Amino acid sequence: MTTPARKQYLRIKSQFPDAILMYQVGDFYETFDEDARIAARELQIVLTSRQYGGDGERVPLAGIPLHALDNYVGKLVHRGYKVAICQQVGEIGKGVVDREVTRILTAGTLSEPNLLPARQNNYMVAIAPGRAHTGLAVVDVSTGEFQVTWFETAEMPVALDAELQRLDPVECLLAEGHEKQSYHFPTKTVTITACPPSFFQPEAARERLCKLFGVQTLEAYGCAHISQAVAAAGAIVAYLEKMNGNLLSLLTGLRSYRTTSYMALDAHTQRNLELLQGTRSGTLHGSLLSVLDRTITAMGARQLRKVITQPLLDLSLLSDRLSSVEELFESPALRSRFTMCLQAFSDMERIAGRVRQGTAVRNEVFGLRDNLALIPQLRSQLLGCNATLLQQLAEEMDECEDVVSLIDRALMRSGEEDEDGDDGRLIRPGYHAELDELFASIKDSRRWMVTLEMRERERTGIKSLKVGFNKVFGYYIEVTKANLKLVPEDYMRKQTLVNAERFITPELKEHEARILTAFERIEEMERSIYADVLRQISVQYNRLIETARAVAWVDVLLSFAVVAAHQGYVRPVLEQGHGLEIVEGRHPVVEATLDGDVFIPNDTELDADNATRILLLTGPNMAGKSTYLRQVALITLMAQIGCFVPARSARLGLVDRIFTRVGAEDDIAAGKSTFMVEMEETATILHHATQHSLIILDEIGRGTSTYDGLAIARAVVEHLHDVTQARTLFATHYHELSALADELPHLKVYTMAISEDANGIVFLHRVRPGSAGRSYGVYVARLAGMPLSIIRRAEEVLGHLEQRPSPVLSLDAPSTNGRRVKQVAEAPSRYEWQSEEARELATRLEQGEDVDLDLLDVYAITPLDALNILFLWQKKRSKQHIR
């Protein structure tokens, strides 16, 4: 037989089958059945059981204290579980107390500060794929950010993967049936949530958004014409409404943005350049962020992460940022004043959100009040600056004097005493007349107790008699055992102690009831008044958020200036055009991690229009090629986020995209080898790079035969030189490619300098003109601790091989682009096609047919097939040109 309480639990649990139900029972939250087993395992708490009904069946049970809810729930949510909080909402009486689920917590719906990383956003995304566009909506309920963007089919999946890498969401909403689609997230811990398709229905989503914002159309939000963008944003609103409708109050607007407004950084580039996370550490250590982050506030740290991954393409905006950094850089006194001011700021952005939800505690409200009190000082300092952006940030700040005044009038700080010396009040005396009367009645009661004590001492003759109170037994009269014979008959025994007895009287009991009623009324009224104060503050939510975000920007610009001053960075010169000139450039992360050593700087000069379009870099392993390549990319990126750069000087033409192909790993889950991954990344670059791009390629053509690798590397270099015409740094171990300098007018060959003597070689980490004659791989193997017998044998084999003529450069043969190339003697005479589509297209090209390459599905063929098709197409074009 099932008890009424068990029936209530099962009824509520049936409504949330996919969530762990935290069911309030008095001062505990309890879990039952399979939920209890999960909670016990994940939280390391005791699993017990309880009998419900008379049939003897025991139900698994695991509970946590009421006050520890956030801590335990946070652990469950961060491990991918959905948690429903079921609270007691009715008065405790004879029957089963009423309960209801008040909120559902998931990774993307957390707003409690102790459950969130302070210096990182907690993004949830929704993806709505469509024929013409794919919509992506983004929300952080802890800060109120709500944004939407979209990608055309031609941009997919590269652009979407890049944005997911940048956002690093903790939860992703997908329509049921789409959850198994292949989206690439930076971390494997992201929670994938399948939602009803109705959440993503465009028209329903449009109505949902219009209702939320109180508008008739979405024209003002910039996404009305993109149905999939609307669908994604509407899905987030529907989901939040289901999980915790209170969170919707934080969404006061929707910002539309296009990733094309910023420098494109695909997912591979973001990882290869280690912008936010070091590859080896998997943490902040070793990342660009670790070097640039000198922010003081949590909201400034979150803003910096966005800035690093969204470099600008607008020269005017960049000039404003750089001028602001320069003014702060040049004045240590100004930096010091801003630093002292910002050190007093709490997380104003997230506190404003908790006020809006009505969940902020008193200390947070006073933290907000104290932040606002600092704004006049901060604004005054900003208005005294010359930089346009700093003055603009001052104008965006609102001192919110009305909010400060309201808090000062309505609330008392924790521990603050009123005029009577009491420190337990929440609402300040004078703010609410009825509450003041209740406190006055309690004070009268306390005076009455003193009077009662004096009167009873006199009446009974017991000089040690005391009138007291505790939370368990209420009011009492205490008499020592030595004086029990003097106790009057109207005293009623209430409690026995070791050395005393406690009594009550009808008069005391009647007065106790009045006092306790007053206390209950005070507690209820203070809660109501406090909630009303939060509501009044929340009306100014937009003003608070805009001010918080302006403070965050000041923090970011100050951080750039502090790093520049400490590390010896310079202001870069940015311009339109295709040039790139860096004098004595340094790698910002490597330099910062050197312990007493001096980083060896190097120059770089590229120009897509003339002179050096491609810098072909040769040299042995460990000589510093990869460091140099990344250094150029990072300096370029730093310049376009408005930061000073590690160099003696830098003049850079704006870059629309940075592409990097540096290192590769197997993708075993997708059945792809290292070589396949490398080819796919290279193909992406060739498809999307423009003349305004910066391309970093390290060791193209590894993982296959020497001939295949060299052929592919050469073909890629020629294509970049003749077709793409982008600024390119190309590192290679194929020293044979150095001969391309004689054929490609905009290619220059450089090498990493070494010093060699009888004792071995020394890597000088200097980039100089010329080609490396050897790879010194055997020497590096010796440094790595390879057994000496193997080293000696390798040297013998190498000596024999070096005496032979190179098999790679033996026959002159015409190329498909009209040049003479050194043909690989042992190379196969026919292509080995990996797909039937490529084979058919190749046959048509060889037969001289006109072929529309736009009809070729490049994602359906291998990168090598694509390159071979390109060779045949160029060959056909050159024959037509000759005719």
Image (cartoon, rainbow, N blue to C red):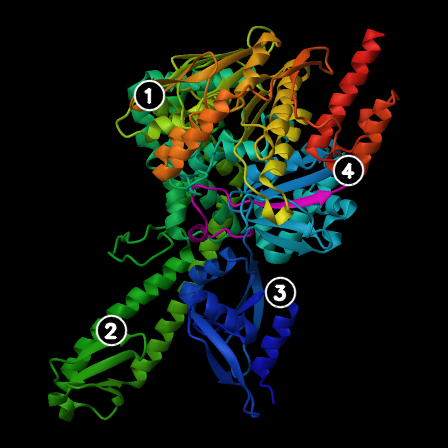
The circle on residue 449 is: 2
Report the amino acid beneath label 3: Asp
Task: State which quarter of the image contains the N terminus.
Answer: bottom right
Query: Relative to the observer, which residue lies in front, 669 or 752?
Result: 752
Give the CA distance from mark 4 to mark 1: 56 Å
Splitting the image into 4 quarters, where does residue 867 fall? Answer: top right
Local SS, label 4? loop
Local SS, label 3? loop
Give the CA distance from mark 3 to mark 1: 53 Å
Splitting the image into 4 quarters, where does residue 872 fall? Answer: top right
Report the amino acid beneath label 1: Ala
> Which residue carries the number 3 mark?
18
Q: Which residues are magenta?
A: 108-131
Give the CA distance from mark 3 to mark 4: 44 Å
The circle on residue 565 is: 1
Query: Relative to the observer, which residue lies in front, 62 or 285?
Result: 285
Report the amino acid beneath label 2: Met
